[in-house]
Image: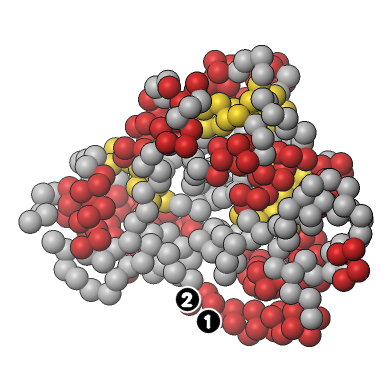
Amino acid sequence: MPDSSAPVPFFSQARTFDRLWPAISARVEEVFDNGKFSHGKQVGELERCIGDYTGARFVIGVNSGTDALVLLLRALGLRPGDEVIVPAYSFVATASSVVLAGGTPVFADIDPVTYALDPAEVDRVAGPHTRFVMPTHLFSQMADMSALSRVAARRGLTVLEDSAEAIGMRQVGVHAGLHGAGGVLSFFPTKTLGAIGDAGAVITDDPRVAEVVSGLRHHGRFGHTLDHFPGISTETARPGTNSKMDDIQAAVLLAKLPGLDEEIARRAQLAEAYRERLSGIPGLVRLPQVVDRGPGSAGVFYVYLIEVERRDELVEWLARAEIGTETYYPIPLHRQPCFSGLDSARTSLPHAEAAARGALALPLYPDLTLGQLDRVCSAVRAFYSGRTA
């Protein structure tokens, strides 16, 4: 058993908040001074700033990444019976959002290197009722959007992106979420740009999609509603929902956004340190490999994901050493009970199933120190060297 010292949490941003507290508190004071705590001035400013950062023409703040997916699918005209191809290895919201929007997810296998939807799989599973394909950009890099776009064009499918984890990721100069009809961002606290609660956004270059999402997030009310008190009484054009972003979350995100690129660079430094220290360990099947997609492309290490033998034993070993980990995702989507009635849930998808058996995320966040990282790596090495008694 490794020597016990200070715990290494899977995620912490305590030092970041200490450093940013003057800027955060000033932003929060503005929220109280304005007197509008949801769908207000700070949300509008955040939408403009995220647009500047990503290059999106339109950014629509909502209350979670999951809602962003549902509203984007609805705005794109998803109808009952329409099929949406999704990767079988992802967070459950990738598929449940399709169901919540009224469609049917069709599960496809992943590329084992990027963990993203395999373009060849789209050709294999697309059928007469398939209208959309929704790749997910996971962990450290984007799906192969050039190949997916070619397949989608040949099949007559609309591309949208589950880019919830992908702020800062780009391919051929285009930010994640903007390679098709639209994408989403999640600002869940552990994300690369995280709030202090749930928040999300739809990003798109399509003015019609932006208009519909903007209305749907505010109970189906269209027109001027952002930071507009009388907007509560405007006409309801279609059934919507209450998915307005809280201004407190927008205030925190605005305070953190200027340092985002610096934090992304820190994540890359930590990922390289992991690579140096973990290479060559027997039992460690795979370290992250970011695929070169050409000029103007960049990955972001949101999660440092390894594949290992005896994954669950390693998790227990690290927990006893007070080292936090996260298992992404132990049940692939086509094996989740809630989707058991779907035809595509009855097939074998070997790459997704292998990832579900062996993938493990190690601590990776800007507040992580090299000393803490060394302790994580020493514990992993100790486990696979047999010093587990």
- Residue 3 in view: yes
Name the residue that disc number 1 marks: 18
Query: Residue at point 54% right, 77% down?
Result: 17
Residues marked 2 and 1 touching at CB (< 8 Å): yes
Query: Residue at point 91% right, 69% down?
Result: 230
Percent coordinates x, y for residue 318 in the rendering: 24, 58
Compared with 158, 31 (above or below) is below
> Which of the two residues, 239 or 186, is positioned nearer the viewer here?
239
The answer to which image quadrant residue 146 occupies is top right
The secondary structure type at the circle numbered 2 is helix
The answer to which image quadrant residue 149 occupies is top right
Judged from this view, the residue extending furthest toward the left is 389
Image quadrant containing the N terminus: bottom left
Percent coordinates x, y for residue 91 in the rendering: 49, 44
Compared with 188, 88 (above or below) is above
- Residue 272 in view: no
Name the residue that disc number 2 marks: 14
Disc 1 packing (10 Å; few <14; some 14–19; many ≥20): few
Q: Amino acid at mark 1?
A: Asp
Q: Is residue 267 left or right of residue 236?
A: left
